[in-house]
Image (cartoon, rainbow, N blue to C red):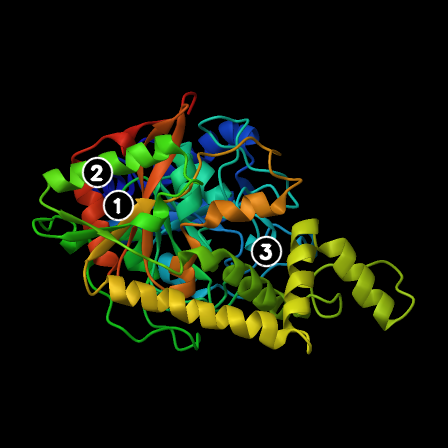
Amino acid sequence: MHHMTLAEIARGLADKKFSSEELTQVLLARIAQLDPQLNSFISLTEELALSQAKAADARRANGEAGALLGAPIAHKDLFCTQGIRTSCGSKMLDNFKAPYDATVVAKLAAAGTVTLGKTNMDEFAMGSANESSYYGAVKNPWNLEHVPGGSSGGSAAAVAARLLPAATATDTGGSIRQPAAFTNLTGLKPTYGRVSRWGMIAYASSLDQGGPLARTAEDCAILLQGMAGFDPNDSTSIDEPVPDYSASLNGSLQGLRIGVPKEYFSAGLDPRIAELVHNSVKELEKLGAVIKEISLPNMQHAIPAYYVIAPAEASSNLSRFDGVRFGHRCENPENLIDLYKRSRGEGFGAEVQRRIMVGAYALSAGYYDAYYLKAQKIRRLVKNDFMAAFNEVDIILGPTTPNPAWKLGAKNSDPVAEYLEDVYTITANLAGLPGLSMPAGFVDGLPVGVQLLAPYFQEGRLLNVAHQYQMNTDWHTRTPTGF
């Protein structure tokens, strides 16, 4: 049962081959048995899961149908879930139980999903390795000595290890796509505003976007269908009709124009990954796609711009965690200043403190124009590059990451080296574009992903290309040994 995809589960439930309750019990037992190796969950919600599974079975018995009705999933632990700990991977929120459901959680619950638990993540979604969590590092099921990617590493590791078929995740600079690449999954970051951020604890408000992590493009289409849509509670939500993502999966790729940016193949890219990217290009050519070299000249400026904008927004967003209203509070503060300093110093980990300090510096009176304003101008240049490129091509293709997953602890002493691993993913967040990573091979036994980018609200096009690729390759079917 644990090897079934979301699509296969939907068919099995519809054909009454098993019940949602039976499936939920199997997966909860599997999580109890295997997750101690991975540390992919922060909280398990067994009682909630079984009650939701029974309710889903009753709805099916009454004639109701739906691809997500009775499907087991998990939520990244920054989506508020009513009455359940929502920690953001931080000591600061270790004792916080959300008083309401995030829109994504509520929409998926209404569709009939079964919540197995909350997955581990980099603290406040800050990281590319899932090593900054207060609850300890997550391990990559493909090699337990390596990172699963971050910040959605818990969701990725759990799905890759077949503990569940799919999970929610978020992407601020690549935090869906990079873990997908590192764990042999398909991960989709939708257009900014496509999925509501209401109830999703913010890191960088102009960059954050929720999306699905699953084994196949078909499963991502099913889960995104339940997540997407306008939300009046979210001022950044876009009132744009949501298409039937599954309906477009089988469209022909004949004549599809795919652009490959020459800037992607610089000295920083592992040549073995470059070869796998070229192999995926050849596969898509066989399916009728037309390949064209393009240029994204401002890509080189994306990382410095991102690492000014994101920390600046983080320093503002995280100012609310002060020990006064909710979250961690220090013991016996001497006065208000002592309360603020010690509560924040004790509650936030090193990486979060680093980004808050950088962000506060960039926003300070003497440096705002020199750093933050200039970074926003670069952001516009990055967006303009993409708009020019999409006048020539329909899809942009390249590597998701410059290297395969590194060993746990290998980059802890050099944060900049970790930041550079986001070089191919952050541009989509700066421009607000949809992006998808799909499995494309292995290097030294570790998975490698290929990234696809599309114009705004063209998630269906990304899913169509990835699905057709997966119908003609088998990388996405490989399972890590022992799981």
Q: Is residue 203 visible?
A: no
Task: Inspect the image, locate mark 2, and give the three-letter code of the amino acid beneath it.
Answer: Gln
Q: Tell me the tag on residue 470.
A: 2
Q: Tell me the tag on residue 474.
A: none
Query: Tag 1 or tag 2, which sits nearer the N-term?
Result: 1
Q: Residue at x 54, y 49 (%)?
A: 419
Q: Residue at x 19, y 60 (%)?
A: 244
**Whole-percent x, y for residue 173 in the image:** 46, 55
User: Image quadrant of residue 186?
Assistant: top left
For the residue labelled by badge 1, is the local secondary structure a helix, a strand or a loop? Answer: helix
Residue pointed to by mark 1: 217
Q: Residues within 10 Å of mark 2 (few under 14, many from 20)?
A: some
Nearer-the-camera pick, 368 or 409: 368
Query: Tag 3 or tag 1, which sits nearer the N-term?
Result: 3
**Whole-percent x, y for residue 463 in the image:** 23, 51
Q: Residues within 10 Å of mark 1 (few under 14, many from 20)?
A: many
Tell me: 90 left or right of 345: left
Tell me: 370 left or right of 449: right
**Whole-percent x, y for residue 475 in the image:** 28, 31
Query: Tag 2 or tag 3, which sits nearer the N-term?
Result: 3
Task: Inspect the image, locate mark 1, and give the three-letter code of the amino acid beneath it.
Answer: Ala
Verify CB contact (< 8 Å) between mark 1 and mark 3.
Answer: no
Residue pointed to by mark 3: 124
Q: CA distance from mark 2 to mark 1?
A: 8 Å
> With respect to residue 209, does 132 lie above or below?
above
Q: Residue at x 33, y 72 (%)?
A: 230
